[in-house]
Every structure is written in C-alpha cells, then in structure tokens.
Amino acid sequence: MSLLPVLYSFRRCPYAMGARLALAFSGQSYELREILLRDKPLEMLKISPKGTVPVLQLPDGRVIEESVEIAEWAFEKSGQVPWIGAGRALFEEMHSAFIPIINRYKYPDRYGLPDGLKARAQGRRFLEKLEDHLQKKAFLCGESLGLADCLIFPFVRQFRVVDRGWFDQEINLPVLLKWMTFFTGHPLFEKIMEKQDPWLETRGENSAVIQVLFS
C-alpha cells in the first residue's frame, strides 16, 4: 500500500479535474494513476466496480469514489471548511441542470436537436448566475478560493471549449472570464494538467510511480 493516497484519474475528465484541483489547492499530495477509459486497470475495478474516475484510495485502504467526496476529504484534511455560503447550492445546480445542458450543447445530434444553440442560451443563464456571485466576491463564495470553485470551474471550461470564440468574445461576462483566467493561468492548474503515460501495471508494463507532491 502506498504511503500516499492513490488517485485513479483521467486527465480530461472534468469530474477528475475538479478532484485534482481540490487536492492541489488544499495541498494534498497523492500518487497518480492515469488510466485509459477503454482499458481500465483491474486494480481500480477491484476497489471501485463502477469503473468511473476519479477514485481515491487512502493509505488505510478506504476508498472514495465520487469527485465531490474526494474534494470534501481534501479540504477537511487541510482544515478548511468544504462548503461556504451558496457553494453547495451552486454545485447542486451545476450537477442537476448545467451538466445536462453542456451535453446537449456539445452533442445535439445525440438528443435529436438541430444544433446546440438553445442549450447554449440555457447554459449562459447559469454562467450569468456565476457572474453575479463573482461581481460581489473574488471567488464564488467569498474572498478566498473554495470547494465550489474547484468543482465548478472544470465544467465551465468544458462549456467554453465547445465554441471558444463565442465564449471569449461575445459572452460579455468579464468577471467570469477573469475567474477563468485565474485557473487557466495558475501553476497548480498547469501541474494537475501535465500529460502522463497511462498506468498499465495490469498489462505487464513497467509502470513508474508518479507522485504529485504539494508542500
């Protein structure tokens, strides 16, 4: 068993990205096992049969299988309060409403839609709500970064990449864009987004241990 928590992750998955951000900003080091979604390691499936990332296995053997629970563990471990103010409500709205909108915006044909423009307009309303919060404070729930910021940013980023030109030039939500730039330009974001070779120990590969360390 590793002396560090072991994180099974997939670099581009927004759920896994949110967990990695929470671990990074709370200063929690971990051993990273980057997986292939098409060829998931047996070690991960043994501890988490649902087969989705992220999955965090603690040194005592306990397994945390949901991104929000990993993020809560990280913040609590560092002595921070996980949820502040409207943070939980914003996260719940993102999870129940904004993520389905993103899927319809990205893949309208899967839902029998002619295009994603209606979904884009619906998604903008959630972004305007974030803008309102950010007009009052530097982050979504206060003057310092919180759990809601870590978990919501990856999905706003996912929404943005569908049509980056429209998002950056026409959305006209300047404080939201500034908040986005805080993350995209932050050294910790760059660190958690570094490309790593897949962890292939189950297929007889010689897998090196990748430790993601924060002081």
Image (tube, helix red, strand yellow):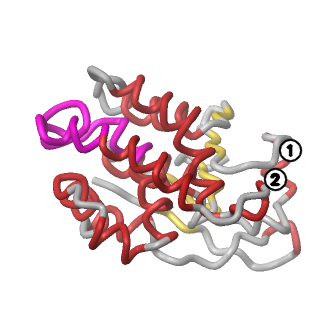
Task: Compare residues 130 and 213 and report the one nearer the observer.
Answer: 130
Q: Amino acid at mark 1?
A: Lys
Quadrant position of residue 131: top left
139 left or right of 3 in image: left
Q: Which SS class for mark 1? A: helix
Residue at the location (50% across, 63% down)?
211
Does residue 200 show up magenta in the picture?
A: no
Q: Which residue is mark 1?
A: 46
Residue at the location (88% across, 73% down)?
203
Q: Which residues are magenta?
A: 129-152
Say the numbered circle drawn on residue 25.
none
Task: Compare residues 113 and 14 and report the one nearer the observer.
Answer: 113
Q: Which SS class for mark 2? A: helix
Quadrant position of residue 78: top left
* Position of residue 67 measured from the top left corner of the image (x, y, whole percent): 57, 40
* Position of residue 158 measured from the top left corner of the image (x, y, whole percent): 50, 61
Residue at the location (62% across, 32% down)?
60
Quadrant position of residue 139: top left
145, above or below 195, in the image: above
Q: Which residue is mark 2?
A: 43
Residue at the location (75% across, 79% down)?
206
